[in-house]
Image (cartoon, rainbow, N blue to C red):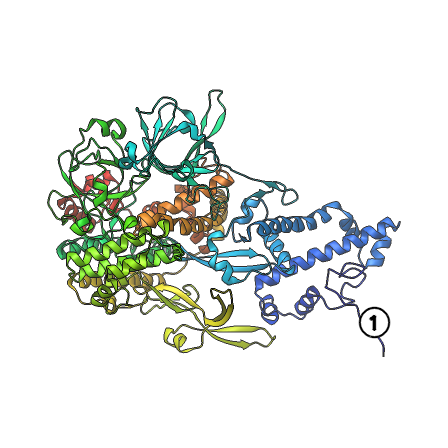
């Protein structure tokens, strides 16, 4: 029997909108119709989602899209009939609806609500078409000014149109945990492409709406530049080499004022096309006709545009042309109007103060074993004291949160192998003063006349540690750095011993050394006057070294130097490896022939002797601990083994099963051995050769971890030296402490929620939820900060590749500040700092009474100062400090630590410490 078939895309083709007419399902069973039919049969939402092979959230989003589409279609049909002269009752009869429903359909507000989804989708579409990859995860909607439902529905609508959503995992710098970012891309964008370009994922914050999505407004920020006519360049012949990287400023010039700071690491735009980077300080010696002096080691024959750096789009924020995270400042001009300063701040006075509260294994492992053990024992004992204190917590949610955080910190410490800081150790930025003697240092934070050592990363060995005498009477340095918080002045020649440091923001650890506990040694003769640029220039047509490969090579040679030192290599061998490392550091920037350097310095022989073979890598626990290790693709931690306290993961085996509704489910296992034996989750990897030919390969999906994190016994990574045994014992103790803390979490129940308490403390509950709402707004900013920090940390590591977690956290905070400034400061934090929920005593009463549910309380705790919460939650004691802490404090005091350092390490106030020690 002949029939007519209508072909087309549902909801997008045909004379009338799909779903219009008396029976919306008359032409085919729609998605919404199918769902309603299953609901009428009593099938649960979860089972419907499983049957359709989608998640519950996807089911809800699709239902919302279908409802919007059906409402729009019904409204259009009602309006068409109204224009033909039908009454509301007549329209209702035709469409099978009552008169009130027709009135609602004809209400412009209905059409308006349907249009909001479309308008929001249009904005997201515009941004993704411009930026390729945009973050559409939790919290973004709060910056756009719409609800999460509208956001999800708009994203779902774009998916219906072919756009894709990918979930990209980014490792958090500092915590070692992973953050999953929901990314919207164009139709032809693969997951592999997004992952490779994750530093280019942007927030769609160039637009915002104040009316729920009906109208959208754009945002923009552009840095100011100064004219090059205001800058006097001091070339090498003029003495610029001794101050390379220092930018001297005229005092009293508003647009380049340092404000309340004496110095700052800055980026300054020049002529709108280039910029200066370096340390900015005031000077009384600015030549007439200029406002700034820029010091460079480049010769005067260098073209002006080559002296400055060329502006380029930042990979994450296109309005930032400086290639690093900066924060802008404003000032009031002569007319009292607010203007944008030309100074873009990377760090300023006070920012370096708390960078290093630990000492790296790269440094400490090259010192005497007795000092290594002493500092590691102190770090471990401080952790044990902290666990004992946390174990006394009474609030279940607080105990769960703090112990979980503590366990993760122990795991991270086992990987990074950081030791407790030495007494009065401080991180300082270096500035040059040639009136300071080569064997002296201007260091206002240290005692006049005492000996101090300076350590800079990357750290090759004790031959790179200068020992200097503090002289705080130097007039030149004192005129610039009087009472400076975190800067020191040295003679420019000292920089050559400090791994070739510059004065554009390089930092050093300054450690008092009157006792001689830090070993030093003369500079290696083989390195004297060695110039990597002159020694290994590139040749015409030589392949350029990529930044990614340079970082890998730098890590490789750094590990080699560490392994050689631990295994007792002689100074000539160390010099060969250090020379090669100097070439590798500059290879990308100056296109050096690093391969010839490896041949001339016979790096293959050194690797064979100290790492097992010419192609081997790290061979000692110190260098292996944080080395990457691939493990089968797995979900983030899904539980805790109550018997051992170890984290439980779900590994994907690659197998799938079909359920009763036709949907598929991936098979998982909690056994790593079983996961290794299984085929595993796979993906198609596309590679291309030099000719551009592509090849597709099915590859097992793996997850990046570290060798230390994946072993139960750190000794499996050791080659058997004394120092490695000390570090192995330390790491194993930390791992055991982490597992003990997690076992305690597993036995801790949830908070008992009390509806009656919620009524009694309704005002406090409302206040806490309002604060939580503000905190949730910062979720996408945290993700963006991770993206910015991950990209910019590569630049930081070029001069300091062993940044400790505190330093990395500092960089993340700067990225977060920049993101907040692009959006606008929060009402209760106008300077743009991190917003934390402040819990009042009355609100704490509400929490203790059970007025907040367990999950909500855990979310609040994730967005507050846990140290403050810890003080509120701990049982009150008469002394304020347990006896174990008092004993630890006395021990640290006798070792030379200040009361301020002890109070910070033990988490108590100076007054509490004083009261308990006296």
| For residue 777, side relative to residue 469 (left or right) | right
Q: Residue at x 58, y 73 (%)?
A: 663
Task: Please tell me which residue lies in front, 602 or 387.
Answer: 602
- Image quarter where the C terminus lies is top left
| Residue extending farthest front | 540
Q: Quadrant of residue 282?
A: top left
Q: Nearer the viewer, residue 913 or 753?
A: 913
Q: Is residue 157 left or right of residue 826?
A: right
Position of 375 relative to 506 (above/below): below
Question: Does residue 75 lie above or below 40 as drawn?
Answer: above
Q: Secondary structure at mark 1?
A: loop
- Residue 58 at what x, y percent from top left? 59, 62
Quarter occupied by the N terminus: bottom right
The residue lying at 24 percent from left, 54 percent from top is 579
x then y, percent, for residue 150: 61, 51
- In-image side of 853 versus 70 (left or right): left
Front-lying residue, 788 or 109: 788
* Residue 599 vertical placement versus 865 (above, below): below
- In depth, the one of 437 and 55 nearer the eye is 437
Residue 730 in the image: x percent, y percent?
A: 22, 60
Please give the name of the residue rendered at 30% of the width and 40% of the height, measured from the top-left corner. Answer: 352
Indicate the position of residue 885 as horizontal and vertical percent values.
20, 49
| Circle 1 residues within 10 Å: few <14, some 14–19, many ≥20 | few
Residue with the mark numbered 1: 4
**Farthest residue in the left direction?**
515
The number of numbered discs placed on residues in the rendered structure image is 1
Residue 557 is drawn in which quadrant? Answer: bottom left
Which residue is at the far top? 335
| Residue 80 visible in the picture | yes
């Amino acid at each position: 029997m002949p029939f007519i078939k209508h072909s087309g895309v549902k909801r997008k083709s045909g004379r009338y909108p799909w779903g219009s007419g008396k029976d919306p399902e008359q032409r085919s069973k729609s998605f919404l119709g199918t769902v309603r039919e299953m609901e009428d049969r009593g099938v649960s939402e979860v089972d419907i989602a499983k049957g359709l092979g989608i998640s519950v959230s996807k089911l809800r989003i699709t239902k919302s899209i279908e409802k919007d589409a059906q409402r729009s279609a019904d409204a259009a049909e009602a309006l068409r009939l109204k224009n033909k002269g039908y009454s509301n009752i007549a329209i209702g009869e035709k469409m099978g609806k009552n008169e009130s429903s027709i009135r609602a359909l004809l209400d412009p507000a209905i059409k308006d609500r349907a249009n909001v989804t479309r308008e929001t989708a249009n904005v997201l579409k515009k941004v993704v078409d411009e930026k390729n990859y945009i973050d559409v995860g939790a919290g973004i909607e709060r910056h756009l000014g719409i609800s999460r439902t509208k956001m999800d529905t708009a994203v779902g609508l774009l998916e219906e149109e072919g756009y894709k959503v990918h979930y990209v995992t980014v490792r958090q710098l500092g915590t070692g945990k992973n953050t999953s970012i929901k990314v919207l891309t164009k139709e032809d964008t693969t997951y592999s492409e997004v992952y490779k370009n994750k530093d280019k994922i942007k927030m769609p914050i160039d637009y915002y709406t104040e009316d729920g999505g009906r109208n959208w407004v754009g945002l923009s920020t552009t840095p100011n530049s100064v004219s090059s006519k205001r800058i006097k360049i001091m070339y090498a012949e003029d003495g610029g080499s001794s101050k390379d990287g220092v930018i001297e400023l005229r005092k009293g010039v508003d647009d380049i004022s340092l404000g309340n700071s004496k110095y700052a690491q800055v980026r300054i735009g020049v002529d709108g096309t280039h910029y200066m980077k370096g340390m900015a300080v005031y000077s009384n010696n600015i030549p007439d006709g200029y406002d700034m002096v820029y010091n460079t080691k480049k010769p005067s024959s260098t073209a002006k545009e080559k002296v400055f750096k060329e502006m380029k789009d930042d990979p994450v924020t296109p309005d930032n042309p400086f290639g690093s995270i900066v924060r802008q400042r404003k000032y009031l001009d002569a007319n009292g109007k607010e203007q944008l300063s030309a100074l873009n701040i990377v760090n300023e006075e006070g920012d370096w103060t708390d960078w290093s509260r630990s000492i790296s294994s790269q440094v400490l492992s090259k010192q005497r074993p007795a000092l290594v053990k002493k500092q590691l024992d102190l770090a471990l004992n401080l952790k044990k004291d902290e666990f004992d204190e946390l174990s006394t917590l009474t609030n279940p949610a607080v105990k769960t949160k703090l112990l979980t955080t503590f366990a993760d910190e122990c795991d991270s410490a086992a990987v990074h192998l950081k030791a407790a800081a030495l007494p009065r150790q401080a991180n300082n930025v270096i500035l040059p003063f040639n009136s300071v003697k080569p064997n002296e240092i201007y260091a206002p934070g240290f005692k006049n006349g005492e000996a101090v050592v300076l350590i800079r990363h990357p750290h090759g060995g004790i031959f790179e540690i200068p020992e200097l005498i503090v002289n705080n009477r130097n007039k030149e340095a004192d005129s610039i750095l009087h009472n400076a918080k975190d800067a020191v002045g040295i003679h420019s020649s000292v920089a050559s011993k400090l791994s070739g440091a510059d004065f554009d923001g390089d930092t050093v650890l300054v450690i008092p050394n009157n006792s001689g506990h830090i070993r030093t040694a003369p500079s290696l003769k083989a390195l004297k006057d060695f110039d990597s640029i002159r020694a290994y220039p590139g040749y015409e047509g030589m392949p350029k070294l990529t930044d990614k490969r340079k970082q890998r090579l730098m890590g490789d040679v750094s590990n080699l130097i560490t392994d050689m030192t631990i295994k007792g290599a002689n100074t000539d061998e160390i010099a060969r490896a250090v020379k090669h490392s100097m070439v590798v550091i500059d290879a990308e920037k100056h296109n050096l022939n690093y391969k010839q350097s490896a041949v001339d310095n016979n790096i293959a022989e050194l690797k064979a002797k100290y790492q097992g073979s010419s192609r081997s890598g790290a061979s000692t626990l110190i260098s292996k601990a944080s080395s990457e290790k691939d493990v089968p693709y797995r979900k983030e931690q899904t539980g805790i083994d109550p018997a051992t306290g170890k984290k439980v993961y779900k590994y994907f085996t690659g197998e799938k099963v079909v359920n009763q509704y036709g949907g598929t489910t991936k098979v998982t296992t909690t056994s790593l051995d079983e996961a290794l034996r299984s085929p595993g989750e796979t993906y198609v990897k596309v590679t291309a050769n030099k000719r551009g030919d592509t090849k597709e390969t099915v590859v097992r999906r793996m997850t990046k971890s570290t060798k230390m994190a994946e072993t139960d016994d750190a000794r499996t990574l050791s080659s058997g030296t004394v120092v490695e045994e000390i570090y192995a014992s330390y790491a194993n103790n930390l791992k055991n402490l982490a597992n003990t803390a997690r076992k305690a979490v597993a036995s801790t129940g949830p908070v008992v929620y009390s509806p009656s308490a919620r009524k009694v403390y309704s005002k406090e509950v409302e206040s806490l939820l309002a604060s939580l709402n503000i905190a949730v707004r910062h979720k996408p900013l945290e993700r963006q900060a991770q993206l910015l920090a991950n990209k910019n940390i590569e630049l930081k590591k070029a001069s300091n590749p062993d940044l400790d977690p505190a330093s990395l956290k500092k960089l993340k905070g700067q990225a977060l500040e920049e993101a907040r400034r692009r959006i606008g400061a929060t009402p209760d934090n106008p300077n743009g700092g991190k917003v934390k929920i402040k819990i009042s005593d009355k609100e704490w009463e509400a929490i203790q009474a059970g007025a907040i549910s367990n999950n909500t309380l855990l979310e609040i705790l994730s967005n507050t100062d846990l140290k403050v919460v810890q003080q509120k939650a701990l049982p009150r004691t008469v002394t304020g400090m347990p006896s174990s802490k008092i004993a630890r404090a006395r021990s640290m005091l006798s070792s030379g630590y200040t009361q301020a350092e002890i109070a910070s390490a033990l988490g108590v106030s100076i007054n509490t410490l004083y009261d308990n020690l006296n």
